[in-house]
Amino acid sequence: MCRARDMNFLVMDVEGTDGHERGEDKDFERKASLFSLASSEVLIVNLWEHQVGLYRSANMSLLKTVFEANLGLFGHKSQESANLNQRTLLLFVIRDYIGTTPLTNLQSTLAADLQRIWDTLSKPAELKDRKLTDYFDLSFTALSHKILSAEKFESDIQMLRGRFTDKLRDDFVFKPAYHRRIPADGVAFYMKGIWEQVQTNKDLDLPTQQELLAQFRCDEVSAGALTEFNDQAKLQKRPIEEGNVINGLGEIMRAWRSQALSRYDRGASRYHQGVYKRKRADLTGRLDSTLTFLFLGQLKNLHRDVLMSFKTEVVAGLNVKGHNFADVVSKARARAEARFRDGSREAVITEGDPTWQWKDELRMLQKEIPAVADQLRKDRTINVFNIIVVFLLAILFCCRRARL
């Protein structure tokens, strides 16, 4: 963007829609087009004569997207501007014009295409009755072929330049209706505000052909990998639901996950990298969702199994002659917690990932073990007490018989 030579207006040159600089990056193309439309008094649209009447080549699809986004973003402001008869001039410059088709015919074709686009726009409810001419004036001119008709081309350029410099001409482009009425010292802030709104407009984030293909293929490859993964997971789901602890479950799950992601990578990594990575993250999330169910089930089953083993070991230790209750419980508890830690760590898919957190379950186990030990102590005391009572009653009974 710079000041025009010997003239008091700013010229902004926007990268062409078929430029090689960005290739398939249509996102910037759409945003640059909307920014130009929203900030300019006069927007020059270059197109070749042979593109007139063609939808894609003449960038009619781009204009439709930009028109819709412009109404959505600046609709209320545009409505006020329309009420003030403030508009934007769309100046179509037809390049390499050879004169076979009259300019009026080309003009009619382009005007009809633009009107058709406007009629099919998805407009905000409050702007549904607005017409194309409420916001835009259309103007058309032609430039001869620069190489084949060099002199005529230069003449056409001078004629076009006169429309920007000669205020006395009827076709002078800078009419009061197009003026934005922005003071010179506020232009930078004004245009910055427009660009920020354009940048955050999601309606312009439309996928390119490469992205569409990548979405289709990545979804297809992902679905195949997920189906195979789910078939494998079903084999272990029922045992987990039945309360069994599966030895080596972590290694099994890590292998499933690795196989699924490897299959996805082989089939999808050659497509658009942004789509490939986004779909890979989606697939990873779905894999981990299934694995989390198995992981948590394994922890609960292990928790219950370890607690039962602890109880069995303590009971067995109490039956050993000369046992010390505290020592029996301490050793059994250490073995129980160690077994739970080892089993939990083995089941972890990704170390350090909070998804595979098992220490909360360990803390619950550590609270339950003393409670189980206390209950065993009480049960043991009651049993000993009952044995003593029975023994004393038996002695008492024998004494009474002896007296008789």
Image (cartoon, rainbow, N blue to C red):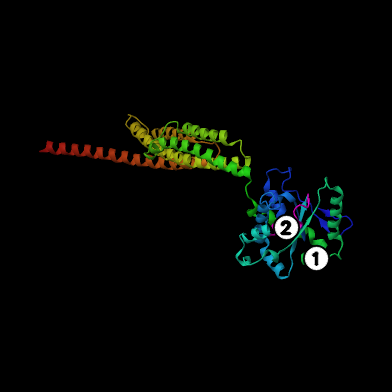
Q: Is residue 141 left or right of residue 347?
A: right
**Apparent side of residue 200 relative to residue 390 in the rendered image (left or right):** right
**Extreme residue in the front direction:** 100
Q: Nearer the viewer, mark 2 or mark 1?
A: 2
Residue 81 sits inside the magenta stretch: no
- Does 165 sit left or right of 129 as displayed? right
Residue 362 in sight:
no
Looking at the rendered structure, the kind of residue marked 2 is Asn
Question: Which of the two residues, 91 or 339, is positioned nearer the viewer here?
Answer: 91
Residue to which mark 2 is pinned: 105
Q: Position of residue 295 (x, y in %)?
A: 46, 39
* Farthest residue, direction top: 321
Q: CA distance from mark 2 to mark 1?
A: 26 Å
Q: Amino acid at mark 1?
A: Lys
Can residue 105 be found in the magenta stretch?
yes
Report the span colored magenta.
96-111
Q: Residue at x 67, y 59 (%)?
A: 112
Q: Position of residue 280 (x, y in %)?
A: 56, 40
Q: Which residue is mark 1?
A: 175
| Mark 2 residue element | helix
Q: Is residue 68 above or below residue 24?
A: below
Quadrant of residue 174 within the rendered picture: bottom right
